[in-house]
Amino acid sequence: MTRDEAFLQFLLRMGDNTLILGHRVSEWCGVAPVLEEDIALANTALDLIGQTQMWLGLAGEIDGGKSADDLAFLRDAWDFRNVLLVEVPNADFGRTLMRQFLFDAWHSIMLGRLIKSSDERVAAIAAKASKEVAYHLERSGDTVVGLGDGTEESHARMQEALDYLWPYVGEMFASDDVDAQMVAAGIAPYPADLRAEYDALVERVLNTATLTIPESRFAHKGGRDGRMHTEHLGHLLTQMQWLQRAYPGAKW
Amino acid sequence: MYAQMVKTAGTGLKSREEMTEQERNFQDKIDADIKIEPKDWMPDDYRKTLIRQIGQHAHSEIVGQLPEGNWITRAPTLERKAILLAKVQDEAGHGLYLYCAAETLGVSRDELTQMLLDGRMKYSSIFNYPTLNWADIGAVGWLVDGAAIMNQVPLQRTSYGPYARAMVRICKEESFHQRQGYDAIRKMAEGTPEQKRMAQDALNRFWFPSLMMFGPSDKDSVHSAQSMAWKIKINTNDELRQKFVDQTVPQAEYLGLTIPDPDLKWNEDRGHYDFSEPDWSEFFDVIKGNGPCNVDRLAARNKAWDDGQWVRDGLLAHARKKRARDLAAE
């Protein structure tokens, strides 16, 4: 794998995470539990789509002058490089916010490292995104605490969400050849090196939320290397890509 | 504005002689363009009418998220998706300011929400129409927000201070919405034959429902006189409808789209376009709950509210526990 190939994979991983999670969050439009949450969910989705435009925009430049839209709307599932965590369905509000928290915690630590990337373009995107993600993390963390330490029902739902999602956490810290090349070039950190900081952050919040982290460290994998996505991704793409696929070449 | 057929409370317009001294002083303030603020004395009927009007407007912003949300997950580009998300977020924000404005009149957001959910309060008829193709999202911005702005711009001068101030902010955002809607539909009108067909189809379906947004014809509009004297309604329904038609026809011509009204033509003598009235029996059907989407829209709002009960309860319980712990620590 050349350095450019590895760099492209890295950018797709970043951009596909924000694209797919942004899409999932946008599915909440108009049906959140309370008006403030409608606003916050739309805002989060909007930030994530904005970050997608930056990551996939840069990925497209590396990939022979494609546009961010080409990459978002014209690739099939096997070419997506997002972690499985972000493609699992929303289910209830509890799972949506737990998924958001588990991702935001990783995202914020990752972006904190990428601000110091040797690649100025990466550093610039990370600097902009990290401000938004600091807010995402604050909000999702507060909500996880509020619902975990709320009523019996909200506690049970949040614990159920955590139990369901925990096996998807490990993939964010998997490392492979792409990562090795990014580390060698000073572009990005080893994901595995972020785990201790992540565990400390997540444990602190989940303890305050009176939730129990599952003991198993088993991790589902296959998203960030595209080897095996969940069945959910295909349905998501069917909807997201429909207009571009049905009317090829049209400008919107 | 998204308020139609708001029933003005009270017995109708009173002459000065029929007014009490308090009512005369109140009317004098309004006539002198002095804003009424929450703590000021106001007639009960003024308060009740405003609650209905602001509440209906707020509900419209909330329900209005649904037809647009219908396309967020299918937006054709990242930019269009971002624009639509920003717009829907603005609308939820408008709902929030308006509920806050209504709260200053002594009604809580939860009470108003309950009245929406059980059908005692209405939202604009326009949101009971479906969004069937992507050009509908452009048409909603161009026509629906365009019609809303016609009404909202004068309401920046409405007599009730909190409502007028909410409207100033809302108008700024709505004009951005209208521009993006027009831009989205322009792109399609200039696009492939299929895109042009979508744009024309959207205009065909949204034209008359947009005209209905202004409410029934003045001759059938029984609630206007008192509301106009109170300056919570600034122009008549027909004035605004005419203004909207006059503004929109040239825009449609520029797009190369045809307004679905064979009788539409410029009237040199009047200096306005002549146009066909919408089918008012359809309008009254929609108002009564028989529009294409009434049942689904209300069901969606009710489901969201019911599904969210545990979240609201949980967050409230947590806030109480936290307060108790903070107090104990003091």
Image (spheres, coloured by chain):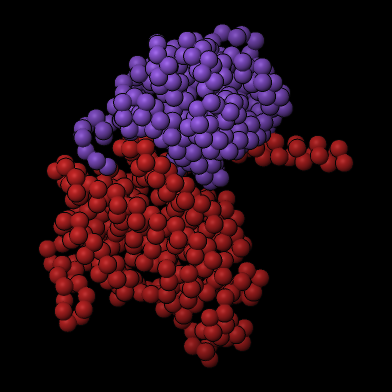
Chain colours: A purple, B red
Viewer-side residue, A91 vs A105: A105
In the rendered image, the vertical position of residue B33 relative to residue A62, given as above or below:
below
Estimate the x, y position of residue B319 in percent, counting from the top left. 71, 40
Q: Residue at x 44, y 77 (%)?
A: B228
Q: Residue at x 39, y 33 (%)?
A: A57
> Which residue is drawn at the image coordinates 58% and 28% (left, top)?
A116
Image-based side of B311 in relation to B125, left or right: right
Which residue is outermost to the right?
Answer: B330
Q: Quadrant of the N terminus of chain B?
A: bottom left
Residue A165 in sight in this render: no
Residue A139 in the image, given as x and y percentages of width and height = 61, 37
| Residue most extreme to the left | B262
Q: What is the total number of numbered labels drawn onto the structure image?
A: 0
Compared to residue A157, the image places residue B2 above or below, namely below
**Residue A56 location (% of width, % of height):** 40, 30
Q: Nearer the viewer, residue B279 or B74?
A: B74
Q: Quadrant of the C terminus of chain B?
A: top right
Q: Position of residue A212 (x, y in %)?
A: 67, 18
Residue B241 appears left or right of B305: left
**What residue is drawn where x is 65% and y is 10%?**
A215
Q: Nearer the viewer, residue A180 or B153?
A: A180
* A85 to B131, vertically: above or below: above
Q: Looking at the rendering, which quadrant does residue A127 occupy? A: top right
Q: Is residue A6 visible?
A: yes
